[in-house]
Image: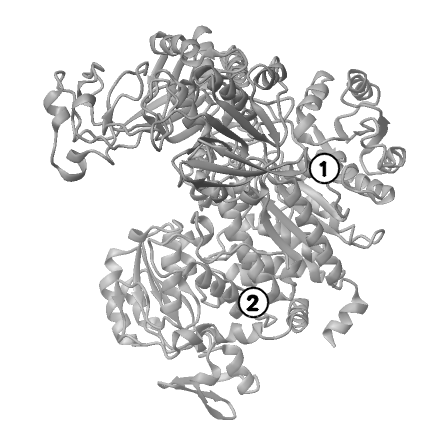
């Protein structure tokens, strides 16, 4: 993550676009916020560090402007997926790629420092030093990184017009990409059920996960809230909460780029990204497909093969 | 909402195992239901009148009939409610016969199930929206696939009725199986003598255009407006120039080509005209045997052809025909002898099939009508006919009867005696199936007047012994083993679906049974219709049948098309997809998944892109509705809310 | 019937109009006896079956869900069942992840002529669901929720 290189790129790109979306300092050092640069004097406000977690590609479908966007590996997949689905036009986007070693989970950092107000944070290659009024804590990046980063296969953007930094190789081999899901799958059916009942029970149906999701493009037409069709009531019962999360997960089948925004946005800390990752794992096994890798792919749920190599007819028992 | 529920007894069919009175009583308590009754036969005229009167009397605005399958009577009752002034889509059926009374034995459970079926139907009906058909123009041309006797009959009847007919035949000549037969039962008419004039009529009819040696490549469209791509296979002969003189055939040096017309009874030439009466009378090169095509050396036919018609470079050609209806008369096939190893599996030259024997009997066949043993050309004196050679044999997957074998065996036994007066025929049979007009008398004549010996039992084994074939079997009437020394054995091989029948069905979107025969819309009441509007069946493609039945179906299918085309406009099914453009986010995933390309992109005045359904193309499958993430495109009459209401009525309660 | 009479479980079937609904009709016309638990929802095509209908049923108390369409290559609408196959396969693999027994959801292909196959399918599936017993409910009232939260 090279901020000087990034600023240089933004300076060259800015004249040819309406807006550049990057990050600037937020309320504290752990919470940078999106920043919309439209004139050169705003460039110096840009920041770039492992606390920059927002998926800025989420803004693209609603912006009717020529836009340059700063993306890390997973977020570049979002751009690819949006283009692939025709939700944005490739020629309207300039992709500024940022190779990434992993981003912070603000929740993990705050847990580590007992939720003390953060005064300052400094970033090293594999660590973050957090200063509070009382102490200075050095945390290994691996310990406080977002869960998604622990199995990340695409630390370098898969698509970029400009790259701010050197390529980064994935630290996790391909076999291990879904190890967390396989571990979860190894539990008994009852354990899995109990786990999710407990998790979904905390859901307050605030829809933050959906609102943060860059691939949720239905906006006010989301069937979790419409009356026509009327898929679910507004009751805060467990079955309705679960139904909502099933809708979100299934609507993302073959589309989720694993940016983890749903999970990051959840105020209740429900691991909702896990649901989508499970489906992604199955999509890869069934169709050899990963969302957001190639613009020319077709999402597997919107196409078919007459002979499906991997789908066998099921017996009832 | 004022819903009326009408529960049908269907005589005892429903009332026998469903307590219809209790069902009516319980369903009367359902929300929105203001009237519930039960009736002996709801589909009868008084039954329908009862519905109409109740609509008026009770001021009903929705109707549920609990009776048989909607596949049976949905249309009937839609018309009934329409006559009483309701929109015809304000109606739902609960299937309490096929899905309940006929399959469950416990009356209490059946009754509960029937009540729930009605409850689901009520939940759906109160969400029905009024739908209205739109009219569209029909293209009054008809495609007939297959020019055997059934297809020719359809083509001629349609053409005589003034319709333009496109007739497609995959062989180089029309006539099908009937053109190969010697005589026909039970009249002993000469087959080609009665078929020949029909073939000429087909060829000369001003309303029939024939594509011989052609196959269906692709079918698009819907009833009234089909686009059919026809592949005209190359005969390597320019048929516009070929005069059918036959000189090429005489001079062709390849004398061992397989004779498809004669089922390999004798070899033919690589370039040939299949039979003397062939229509069109044009030569075709069998590329598999042609030395010029295979090895690049020969070209004798090209040298002798005075019309200069031979063209080894001629490619397949494609034509697209636009039609409004399709009659499928693609005929049948015969099983391979290899499936019958106990009968030699095709290894013994003197064990032949019924159709091959037909060619031996035929005056225009390879032996000019002289019955000769394929092995040595001598005249057989002892001939054994084996019926059910493959038919009614579950072990090879053919449990059905091939319908016409019993009759043609009797015919062949009679003809054999005519040809060789000192011969003796033996017929091994399982049952004699001779149910047609004059058929039973005919099989008796074979036995009583022509001395054919009928042995009731199956043949277990056939093997050669010297120059003879030994046929071992059982006589189940005597309870004894039988052994017959035969000079020639004729197997009545089972009829199967035509080769390629399944692939053609897939192009037509019609269904076929496990044996590949096409499935009619209703086995009794809609025998020539399919479940695909505008596609009709004729002849043995639907199941093995003899000539009179095939001709009858050919005419029936033609009558259906003539009736369809008697109007200028057709009414579209309004149960199609509709877009709520306010909810559509323009992701256009529906455009990607629609199997019919019936959804297009539309730009609204504000510049927003939304999906839009092309009404005449939408077939109403609902793939788009289950693709759309925001429920903006809804299949009418099967909307998300309707299906959810059904699910909820079953699960939440 | 092998299935306990008088104690039905809740089985929901989504059947395409052209093949499987017809197959169920054929079974009825042939008087092929079947367990009575299944309730049939008629849809034009298996491609109309949004996997979320299955989820909705399973979450809200269905003990089993059966989806049946035309055999591949035989879809009345050419391709509907191919989409259904992908969507339903995805669902079948996903359900156990959230603790729903995948055996409670079965999808298959039955043609209009296959009355016997339909009878077998219904009988086998119903028998299996009875072996699995009622689906564990999703607690909706507060007392049960306390157990979850404990």
Are the residues tagged 2 and 1 within 8 Å (C-beta)? no
Residue at screen point 82% across, 19% down? B50
Helix, strand or loop at mark 2:
loop
Q: Position of residue C133 (x, y in %)?
A: 76, 61
Instruction: Work out whether B504 lies above or below B83.
Output: below
Q: Nearest the camera: A312 or B645?
A: A312
Q: Circle 1 marks a residue in which chain?
A: C
Residue at screen point 56% across, 63% down? A208
Instruction: Work out whether A145 lies above or below B318.
Output: below
Q: Position of residue B446 (x, y in %)?
A: 57, 18
Q: Mark 2 or 1, which is nearer the eye?
A: 1
Q: Circle 2 marks a residue in which chain?
A: A
The residue carrying mark 1 is C28
The residue carrying mark 2 is A272
| Disc 2/disc 1 C-alpha distance (Å) | 45 Å
Quadrant of residue B429 within the rendered picture: top right
Q: Where is residue B64 in the image (x, y as percent from the top left)?
A: 76, 30
In this figure, what is the number of numbered marks?
2
Q: Nearest the camera: B558 or A266?
A: B558
């Amino acid at each position: 993550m090279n901020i000087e290189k990034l600023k240089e790129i933004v300076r060259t790109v800015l004249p040819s676009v309406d807006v550049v979306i990057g990050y600037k300092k937020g309320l504290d050092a752990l919470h940078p916020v999106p920043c919309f640069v439209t004139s050169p004097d705003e460039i110096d406000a840009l920041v770039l560090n492992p606390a920059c977690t927002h998926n800025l590609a989420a803004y693209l479908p609603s912006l009717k402007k020529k836009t340059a966007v700063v993306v890390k590996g997973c977020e570049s997949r979002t751009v690819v997926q949006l283009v692939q689905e025709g939700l944005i036009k490739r020629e309207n986007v300039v992709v500024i790629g940022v190779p990434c070693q992993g981003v912070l989970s603000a929740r993990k950092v705050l847990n580590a420092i007992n939720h003390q107000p953060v005064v300052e944070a400094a970033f090293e290659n594999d660590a973050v030093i957090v200063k509070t009024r009382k102490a200075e804590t050095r945390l290994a990046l691996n310990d406080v990184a977002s869960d998604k980063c622990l199995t990340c296969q695409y630390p370098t953007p898969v698509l970029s017009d400009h790259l701010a930094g050197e390529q980064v190789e994935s630290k996790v081999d391909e076999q291990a990409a879904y190890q967390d899901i396989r571990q979860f799958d190894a539990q008994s059916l009852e354990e899995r059920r109990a786990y999710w009942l407990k998790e979904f029970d905390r859901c307050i149906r605030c829809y933050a996960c959906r609102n943060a999701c860059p691939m949720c493009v239905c906006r006010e037409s989301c069937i979790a809230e419409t009356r026509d069709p009327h898929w679910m009531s507004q009751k805060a019962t467990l079955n309705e909460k679960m139904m909502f999360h099933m809708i979100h997960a299934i609507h993302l089948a073959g589309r989720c780029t694993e940016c983890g925004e749903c999970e990051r946005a959840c105020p209740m800390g429900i691991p909702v990204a896990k649901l989508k990752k499970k489906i992604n794992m199955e999509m890869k096994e069934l169709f050899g497909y990963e969302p957001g890798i190639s613009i020319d792919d077709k999402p597997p749920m919107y196409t078919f093969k007459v002979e499906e190599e991997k789908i066998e007819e099921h017996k009832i028992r | 909402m004022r819903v009326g529920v009408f529960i049908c007894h269907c005589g005892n069919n429903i009332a026998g195992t469903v307590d219809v009175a209790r069902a009516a009583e319980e369903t009367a308590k359902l929300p929105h239901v203001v009237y519930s009754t039960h009736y002996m036969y709801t589909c009868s005229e008084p039954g329908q009148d009862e519905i109409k009167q109740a609509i008026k009397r009770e001021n009903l605005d929705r109707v549920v009939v609990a009776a048989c399958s909607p596949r049976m009577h949905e249309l009937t009752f839609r018309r009934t409610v329409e006559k009483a002034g309701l929109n015809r889509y304000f109606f739902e059926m609960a299937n309490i016969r096929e899905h309940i009374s006929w399959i469950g034995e416990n009356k209490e459970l059946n009754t509960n199930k029937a009540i729930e079926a009605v409850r689901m139907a009520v939940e759906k009906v109160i969400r029905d929206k009024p739908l209205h058909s739109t009219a569209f123009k029909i293209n009054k041309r008809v495609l007939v696939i297959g020019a055997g006797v059934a297809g020719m009959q359809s083509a001629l009847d349609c053409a005589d009725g003034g319709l333009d007919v496109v007739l497609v035949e995959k062989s180089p000549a029309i006539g099908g199986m009937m053109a190969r037969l010697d005589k026909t039962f039970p009249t002993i008419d000469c087959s080609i003598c009665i078929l020949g004039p029909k073939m000429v009529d087909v060829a000369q009819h001003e309303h029939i255009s024939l594509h011989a040696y052609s196959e269906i490549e692709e079918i698009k469209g819907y009833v009234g407006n089909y686009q059919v791509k026809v592949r005209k296979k190359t005969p390597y002969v320019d048929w516009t120039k070929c005069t059918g003189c036959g000189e090429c055939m005489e001079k062709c040096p390849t004398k061992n080509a397989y004779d498809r017309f004669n089922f390999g009874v004798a070899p033919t030439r690589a370039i040939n005209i299949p039979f003397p009466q062939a229509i069109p009378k044009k030569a075709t090169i069998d590329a598999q045997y042609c030395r010029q095509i295979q090895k690049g050396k020969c070209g004798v036919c090209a040298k002798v052809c005075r019309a200069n018609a031979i063209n080894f470079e001629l490619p397949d050609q494609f034509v697209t025909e636009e039609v409004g209806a399709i009659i499928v008369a693609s005929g049948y096939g015969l099983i391979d002898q290899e499936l019958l190893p106990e009968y030699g599996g095709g290894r013994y030259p003197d064990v032949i099939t019924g159709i091959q024997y037909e060619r031996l009997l035929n005056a225009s066949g390879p032996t000019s009508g002289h019955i000769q043993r394929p092995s040595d050309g001598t005249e057989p004196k002892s001939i054994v006919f084996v019926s059910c050679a493959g038919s009614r044999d579950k072990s090879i997957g053919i449990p059905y009867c091939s319908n016409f074998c019993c009759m043609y065996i009797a015919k062949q036994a009679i003809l054999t005696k005519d040809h060789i007066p000192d011969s003796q025929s033996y017929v091994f049979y399982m049952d004699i199936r001779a149910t047609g007009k004059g058929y039973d008398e005919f099989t008796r004549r074979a036995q009583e007047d022509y001395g054919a010996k009928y042995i009731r039992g199956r043949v277990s084994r056939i093997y050669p012994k010297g120059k003879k074939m030994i046929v071992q079997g059982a006589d189940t009437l005597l309870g004894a083993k039988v052994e017959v020394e035969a000079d020639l054995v004729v197997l009545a091989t089972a009829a199967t679906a035509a080769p390629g029948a399944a692939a053609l069905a897939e192009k037509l979107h019609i269904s076929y049974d496990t044996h590949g025969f096409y499935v009619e819309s209703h086995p009794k009441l809609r025998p020539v219709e399919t479940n695909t509007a505008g596609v009709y069946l004729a002849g043995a493609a639907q199941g093995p049948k003899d000539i009179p039945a095939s001709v009858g179906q050919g005419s029936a299918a033609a009558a259906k098309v003539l009736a369809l085309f008697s109007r200028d406009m057709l009414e579209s099914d309004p149960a199609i997809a509709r877009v709520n453009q306010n909810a559509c986010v323009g992701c256009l995933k529906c455009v990607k998944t629609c199997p019919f390309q019936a959804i297009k992109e539309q730009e609204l005045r504000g510049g927003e892109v939304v999906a839009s359904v092309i009404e005449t193309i939408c077939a109403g499958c609902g793939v788009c509705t289950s693709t759309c993430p925001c429920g903006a495109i809804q299949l009418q009459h099967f909307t998300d809310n309707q299906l959810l209401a059904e699910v909820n009525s079953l699960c939440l309660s | 019937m092998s299935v306990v009479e008088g104690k039905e479980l809740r089985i929901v079937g989504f059947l395409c109009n052209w093949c499987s609904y017809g197959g169920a009709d054929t079974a009825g016309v042939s008087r092929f006896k079947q367990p009575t638990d299944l309730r049939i929802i008629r849809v034009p095509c298996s491609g109309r079956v949004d996997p979320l209908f299955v989820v909705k049923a399973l979450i809200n108390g269905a003990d089993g869900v059966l989806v049946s369409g035309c055999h591949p290559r035989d879809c009345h609408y050419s391709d509907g069942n191919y989409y259904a196959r992908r969507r339903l396969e995805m669902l079948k693999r996903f359900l156990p992840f959230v603790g729903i027994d995948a055996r409670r959801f079965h999808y298959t292909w039955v043609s209009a002529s296959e009355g016997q196959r339909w009878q077998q399918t219904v009988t086998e599936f119903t028998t299996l669901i009875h072996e699995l017993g009622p689906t564990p409910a999703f607690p909706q009232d507060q007392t049960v929720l306390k157990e979850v939260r404990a």
